[in-house]
Image: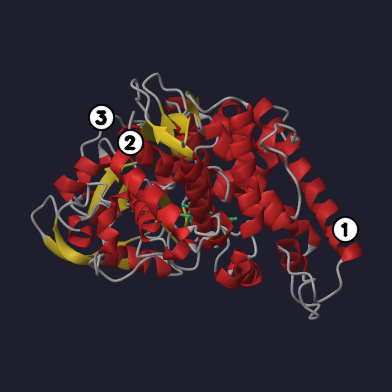
Amino acid sequence: MSAAFPARDLIAVLFTFAILLVVWTVRQSRFSSELIACIPGPRSKSWIFGNMLDLLLTKEYGEHEFKWLQKYGPVYSVKGYFGEHRLMVSDPSTLKYILSSPRFAMGHSQRKTTILLFGKDNMLIRNGESHRHIRNIINPWFSSKNVRLALPAIRENVRKVIDLWEAQGVPGNTFDISQTLHNSALDIMGDALLEYRFDALTGQSELSKIQRTILDSASSPTELGQLADATLSYIPDAVVRWASHLPIPSMQVVKTYQGLTKALSSHLVQQKRETAAVGADHSLIGHLTGLNTTDSSTGVPDEEIPIHLRTLLVGGGDTVASAIGWTLYKIAQMEGLQQELRNEIQSASGNGLDDLDYDNMPFLNAIINEVLRLFAPFPLAERVATEDCILPLSHPVVTTTGRLISEIPIKKGQPIFVAISAYHRLTSIWGADALEFRPSRWFEEEPCKGSALGPHRSLLTFLAGPHVCPGWRFALLEIQVFVTEIVHKFVLSLPDNDSARPSVAVTLVSKTADGVQQLPIHIEAVV
Ligand code: HEM
């Protein structure tokens, strides 16, 4: 999850240059290794920002990063904030090592952001036994059999979107679909995961509005915001937790969000305890409370439940909305492809859309996979080494001093970018046309020419290893249902003045030329 959380006014309180300098000096001496400084990479224009603005604050995501990839290869160095050396990694062997090894944890600023927003013991920052414990509790809920049970709730919510668009007179017009998708994704999670109605689509839920406020303000990254995130990473966890009680506007919003999610979780837990028979409640809350089994030692303490609830609600909302948005965008852009998909939907739905077997719709899945490859909702993940170790490389790297190295020793504290989107653009893995949006590659015997990294079709979109996204099957089903229902009902096209471009702001959002976060699509009813 991205670190771009709006802690700007928090930083106004916490940011003291002198402290930063001292901490920076101590940290530099801990992890900078001479070798890392000799790994080739782009020059940085500023000591404060390093290459980070070129990486994270561009008009279109990847504007510089994908050129660096071509120039320096799948492992290179970039300058982080305050002169820090970071490694940018898309080499499959190195990624496999980093993502499966217990020697890496979530990056510092993402760690603090998740502590502020979700709570101190959230699953993203847990490792080892404590992380395994929570994953063993939630993973069964996300099994393919269980996810299938969510299908009616997903369909019902997508059909509400269609009804709303028809009632609002959307067909025949160009419409920004992004807010609808965000709200509907939250409603789907409420219905399917929590058996609770958020009513985000109709704008009636306080919780959905406040979650939107937090995520929207995080979606307007600025230089100051980037600096705030960078500074946050130097502040101890306990100070971050203390700072969350400060009477400043952004912290008040977070506090309100935490209060609402806490009240929601108490309500859901109490309701389950009153109504569900022990051993028989297979809802997600049933899993978290241990009501799904007669073994009373399973489940988590009640005070932990809101933390997991927040992680799931944020983790499964805008990510899914981003993937659906970009899928509909590409379908709108490619008329022939859209018609072929509509034909597939029509011939597969002989007895109506309720009988569709989504996994047996090759065209639908090829388009979705290609979007998940080139428009991964999380283009970058951050990791930090928790001990000294040696990174393996698929191919040797020539250092700036001319030395050929086939592995990179790193020190504890070394920050690393897991370059998800860059991995999806490696010609060595995806072929010479890796940069091209070509769904037909998914009909080939071997679309990915390398060993699988992620859980779905070798894509790294949902990451891999112990922290692999638990919701990936659920997300895929949501995208499949959304796309089939919408394409069955509407003809999509891009407006003449289309200027939507992918831009990273927590997730891969769409921004138009004026910098506004929106995804305008022209929608007509199918006749
Ligand atoms: C297209 C949609 C989605 C994408 C691209 C996505 C991607 C990811 C990625 C990349 C991570 C790893 C983050 C990291 O460790 O740095 C992650 C973790 C996570 N995701 Fe997803 N996700 C999606 C949908 C969902 C859904 C639908 C849910 C839940 C309903 C969900 C819940 C979570 C949770 C709880 C984690 C933390 C797992 C852990 O740390 O053990 N995600 N997701």
Q: Amino acid at mark 2?
A: Gln
- Kindly identify the residue that appears in the image at 37 percent across and 64 percent down: 98
Locate residue 255, reporting x and y percent.
Answer: 73, 37
Residue farthest toward the left in the current orientation of the protein: 402
Q: Which mark is residue 45?
A: 3
Disc 1: CA contacts within 10 A as few (<14), some (14-19) or many (>=20): few
Q: Is residue 383 visible?
A: no
Which residue corresponds to mark 2?
Answer: 333
Q: In which quarter of the view is residue 332 placed?
A: top left
Is 157 on the left or on the right of 223, as rendered? right
In the rendered structure, are the residues bearing label 3 and label 2 in contact, judged by CB atoms less than 8 Å apart? no
Q: Is label 3 in contact with label 1 (beta carbons under 8 Å)?
A: no
Distance CA(mark 3)–CA(mark 1): 56 Å
Q: Which residue is mark 1?
A: 270
Kind of residue at disc 3: Lys
SS at circle 1: helix
Question: Does 186 sit above or below residue 143?
Answer: above
